[in-house]
Image (spheres, coloured by chain):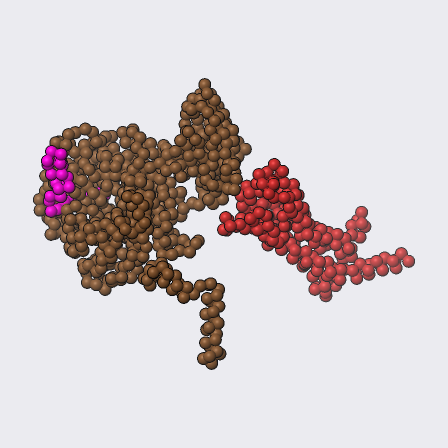
Amino acid sequence: MTALIDRILGPRVAPDERARQTLRYGTPGFLLLTARILLLVSLFLPYWHMELQAPQYPDGLHMTAHLNALTGDVAEIDGLNHYIGMRSLYEAAELERTVGVFIMIAFVIMLEFAAYIHTRWSALLVAPVVLFPVVFLVDLHLWMRHFGLNLDPAAPLSNAVKPFVPTALGKGGIGQFVTIATPGAGLILAMIASLVLVAALYFHRRAYLPLVRQQRAKAETAVN
Amino acid sequence: MTHPASRMIVAGAIAVLASTTAGQTMRDVETVAKERGLTNADLVAAAKTYLPSGQKDEYLMFASGGHAGQIFVVGLPSMRLLRSIAVFTPEPWQGWGYGVGNSILEEGFPSGKSNLWGDTHHPALSETDGDYDGQFVFINDKINARVAVIDLRDWETKQIVKNPLTLSDHGGTFVTPNTEYIIEGGQYAVPWGSEYAPISEYKEQYKGSVTLWKFDRNRGRIDRDRSFAIELPPYWQDLSDAGKLASDGFFFMNSLNTELATGGIQDKKPPFEAGASMNATDFLHIIDWKKAERVFKAGQVEQIEDFPVITLKTALAEGLLHVTPEPRSPHGVDVAPKGDFIVVSGKLDPHVTIYSMQKIKNAIANKTFSGTDEYGVPILDFDSVVESRIEVGLGPLHTQFGPDGYAYTSLYLDSAVARWTLGGSYGSGTPEPDWTLVHKTPVHYNVGHIAAAEGDTVSPDGKYLVALNKWSVDRFYPTGPLLPQNLQLIDISEQGTAAPVIYDMAMGVGEPHYAQIVKADKLQPWTTYPQVGWDPHVQNINPMAPKPKMERVQRNDDGSVDIFMTAIRSHFNPEHVYLKQGDVVRWHITNTERAVDATHGFAVPVYNITASLEPGEAVTIEFVADTPGTFPFYCSEFCSALHLEMMGYLMVEPN
């Protein structure tokens, strides 16, 4: 068991070696720490905005999604959506909003572990976090698609408005409304975190792969 | 770039660019002006008053509606009518008296009789330190002696109090500098409680009075239990104004018919118009309200008509009341911004008469009396209290003040507004000598009150003055024999003889008397009610207000029926309401909208019901379902594209 853990954790760096090559061994850890901070901060920031523009709403209607909440003019937008038979937005992504924060905390812990693991297993912990912004947007798109394509046929305007897929990012339109969906500061931080993590993996590989190879070579020599 | 030619090319390019981007040039303006016969002065007036779509007015004028019984709110300088506020008169757009506000209207019914109109005269904005604070506006009803309180968060009438002593008021409403009291002076003398007494007993039985209504700012209501009145001789008390700064603690009140004329033209006696104008002077009443408040609190009152009254006898014994001669048939009594001068204009005297507060105080202290009237009221010697008299023109009526030492007086007979200079410490503000007539601006026609921007506060703004003209004669397209009033906007921003009329506003919905003009940014109105389920009557959430998913028709043990309904674009819920003939019904409706302007109406045929439900508002409409039948009810505001479909059926099953 200990052997397995050791194999996963990979080679340790000797203190004098680490002191000699601070930058080489410090960079991956520093980048992982940066990503953790970015993700923690993103928890408190909006991930997604949707603005609806129409003549009778001179200030527009605004909706903001945090990882765990949907705020803004949601009731008003729901009120308008009922005309085309769209379900209440509060019913969308309920699970995601419930577990979002915990997933993010799990990510932070995974990155913490990733910093201690000096083998390719580290990449396995980092990869889901890297993919997170994409997963967020795909999930958002799927929900929009689901809501937009499943309109209540008994709604007041069901004859006038055919099922459609609202735009998850960028400009769209429905009726007299122009919709503008933009990523929030939180999502942008998560995207930056992804880039930082890719860089972290690169520097991780550069720092530890030679050590892993050295260890492997040493082990082979021992066996022979 | 230093070459002149290149500079010209650049300038030309900029000019072309500017003209093409704006789409219009000054030449286009000239073309339009020529086509329409507009002078340069007209174009300047237009430029001063025109507001492009979306731009907002700088000032709001709260004008009484006269016998329309309402308040009208007009934006300045655009002179656009922004709103009426229903007060004493039912108003279907606001639902006032047709389902909402009924209980408030009923509070004011005199002798329990249904009275569904009012004669609103003088609105008074609430004040803090003698300046408008934008929180409340009060208004009197001359015909039945009532005072109403309007909350300027939602611009809705919250309270109507009926004066228990008298049936007519004119000297209201005016507020003391911190809105401690709302002054309501009576007018035509009647016996207490307007009980029967033949006019031959006028001197003994008929009473004059002024009532000080205590205002409870936190509750936003007049507190009847802390209010009191002062008995006055049966002169016809007229306008009043509260002192401020130098005259704080006093208020002033005009009077007419100090002759105690009782008319009788049918018996060949002199009519009131002659009998009440016989003397050269009437009496300016000077009342020490702070002293009166102490007398009231000390319990030196009589309960008359179940209301505490400081009798004339007590008022004289305690030195609360003095009078001094004033030009006859007076209208305005107006306190200068620092409170040091009081300006009175009598319509039959071409002068404005200016009294000095310091001299009044001295005369009271030194008892410089020229005698007493026949009720024993001490008369301050006229010459000892007058500061100045200025001949301004014929029919002086009402005075307002500018920020720079100018005063403005309306001239009813001359159809003009006079600008004249104050003296004393104000004198340095104007280039002209003190106490002189500077200029007269003709107005059209028969100007009554005038209102200058914050022109009766401790810090007048100047800029704009509105003449509230009684006759428009030829100013507008004839609208049948009943012509609109003409509210003329005068630009008073420049000194000297420049004070041109820059806008004529036709007011075809009532006859505004007095108005006050407040800087718009002092008000903080709600654009929707703060929370869904709001009861405007208590300005709080009504826990019983219908909520979404809890709509129902509830039949109670006592046989009454409560209907809990919500309204949102574009449906009511429930849409089917079954009742039985004779049911006592309480119909509760909440507008659950949060969008600005998403107002719904609720209108029921036959039952004479219409309500306005502003976003978040909850109302309760009470009626007896005495007429059986099928009644389509609907939303009377064009709320949405499916507005016509926002309806339901009330079905009252016959017995």
Residue A153 rendering spot, x and y as whole percentages: 63, 38
- Chain drawn in brown: B
Please indicate whether residue B100 sits to the left or right of residue B430 in the image: right
Q: Which residues are magenta?
A: B263-291
Nearer-the-camera pick, B356 or B103:
B103
Quarter of the image holding residue B153? top left
Quadrant where the C terminus of chain B is found in the figure: top left
Let me know if residue A102 appears in the view. Answer: no
Quarter of the image holding residue B200? top left
Please indicate whether residue B468 sits to the left or right of residue B317 in the image: right
Nearer-the-camera pick, B634 or A149:
B634
- B289 in magenta: yes
Q: Residue at the top extreme?
A: B655
Residue B172 rendering spot, x and y as whole percentages: 25, 42
Residue B100 rendering spot, x and y as whole percentages: 40, 34
- B329 in magenta: no
- Chain drawn in red: A
Give the residue at x 45% y 35%. B602
